[in-house]
Image: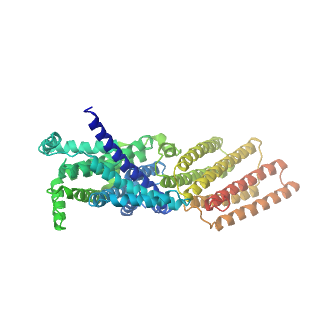
Amino acid sequence: MAWLNPLITILTVAGALGVFLYGMKLMSESLQKVAGEGMRKFFTSMTSHPVKGVVSGLVITAAVQSSSAITVLIVSFVNAGLISLFQSVSLIMGANIGTTSTAWLVSYIGFKFDLTFVLLPMIGLSLPLLFSKKQQLKNWGEFVFGFCLIFLGLNFLKSSIPVVTENSYLVQYIKNFNNSGILSYIIFFIFGVLLTILLRSSAASMVLTFIMCSNGWISFPLATVMVVGDNVGTTLTANIAAFVANAPAKRAALFHFVFNAIGAVWSLLFLHFFLSRIAALMQLAGADSPFTNVNTIPTALAIFHSGFNIINTILLIGFIPYIIRLTEKIIPVHDEEKESSRLQYIETMFLNTPELSLLQTQKAITVFAGEIRQMFALIPQLLIEKRNKKYSKLLLKIEKYENTSDTIEIEIAEYLIRISAGDISQPSSHQVRNMLKVINDLENMSDICWQMARTIDNKNRQNIWFTQEMRDNLTLLFTLVDEALALMITYLDGEYFKKDFITARNIEKQINELRTTLLADNIVNINKRKYSYRNGNCYSELISQSEKLADYIISVQEAISGSKTGTA
């Protein structure tokens, strides 16, 4: 039974780590629900200016406490064409800095204070909130519960790691590494990379590094090398997510790796200088040097982690265009990707961050609406095109849009269902229902565009002609519909549950009035035999179909505002 004690120790450490990881997950997801709408608004304020992009990435990552989730989200936005590669890289830089907040949280609270006497009462106080019928109170209860689990898990880890004596084999083995020169740094760097990949969390890897230092297992320099390895290992998540994505998304993920790898190289080259400055800074502040007191190593590691990422960003922010060119050479764009219009990230990149995934879906719906507008823009061209080859290409392109819209609707609907299956806030649940209504309306709009194309095709097959006045009237009607589509896309890309859509109503009113006038004039002109009934019937079909399209546009506006769907 000698094997039983080591097994129990391993399982105890794994269990303590599980409590810590679950606490991180619960706190992150509950925080998203508490500040979900505000967080989504902040994330949509992304800018092409690198410095503002860095700040945006920093703040949102510090709030969510997961650089991996934010980086995957950024990569998925690039994959959908919602942001450019240039915009994404500054956000990734900011995410690198934002993730260092975890180290400060753990080092200052988890290692400086014993919170056991506070944590259990806090969990007791949060229990009524967990069972509250009010979603916001429940979210706050989950946040407190997750926060407490993080530090309970940390306490379990500190107490479950076996005490290692000075003469133990493990300590002697590590001392041999201390005297192995550059080999010891290479080994612990690789260990940091592999540990982060295995745990899928740089925060968990950082905590284990802290504990190993506090127990005297590894020295301060080797711990910093592990932290650098953590930084490189955390880039794997985004690269896995981008494996099936398009070239720009793969480049964004590769940029993350290259950026962190460059930082790893210079930080290891100047490691001793960097660490001596940190030790001097801590002594200046009245603390002991991390080289002589293991109790100060967690704080020193937090300083190193933040300083390393901040300096790396400052050094490389001016070289963004050159690093992007490097990624472009490594990952070229294939011709077939240029023609692809499918929202691939919807089916390949499901995130465990429901509130931010909802923002991703909103952007996808905006792209979908843009596809519908592009489809409708082909209708006036089809109406006047006389060259057979060009006409056939236009008709085929409209049909392709219609088929693609069916696929996109299914992809987004399935994605929304997966989001709603998670634990999301009440406003987000309302928004999911509204989005399902919107994508259904958008797909119906693509069907109408295809019907209009078929109406024009039947007109041409039957040699039906339109007078110049009829063509001018249709052009005026098509212009109003396109204006309504453009406004609809603006609403879709903005804040949902927006009550004011007076402009959209005014355009709909103009379309309805023009429809009524044109149909009445059409009957008069048929009776006056200005053109045949068959010509007038085809003309009236296009007018009615345009008006029906406008009805669906206003239906989308209402779903966004929540005025007729009853969801706001």
| Number of disc labels | 0
* Relative image position of residue 227 (x, y in whole percent): 26, 50
Q: Residue at x 43, y 53 (%)?
A: 26
- Mark yes or no: residue 378 visible: no
- In the visual, does 331 lie left or right of 407? left
Colour scheme used in the picture? Answer: rainbow
Quadrant of image for the N terminus: top left
* Relative image position of residue 169 (x, y in whole percent): 15, 39
Q: Residue at x 34, y 60 (%)?
A: 117
Q: Extreme front residue here?
A: 1
Q: Extreme top residue here?
A: 1
- Mark yes or no: residue 449 visible: yes
| Residue 545 vs residue 300, the one in the foreground | 300
* Relative image position of residue 280 (x, y in whole percent): 15, 63
| Residue 496 vs residue 143, the one in the foreground | 143
The image quadrant that residue 240 belongs to is top left
| Residue 35 vs residue 565, the one in the foreground | 35
Q: Extreme right residue here?
A: 527
* Relative image position of residue 187 (x, y in whole percent): 21, 41
178 w.r.t. 120: above or below: above
The image quadrant that residue 311 belongs to is bottom left
Q: Which residue is drawn at 22% across and 58% down?
A: 300
Quadrant of image for the C terminus: bottom right
| Residue 501 vs residue 169, the one in the foreground | 169
- In the visual, does 394 lie left or right of 255? right
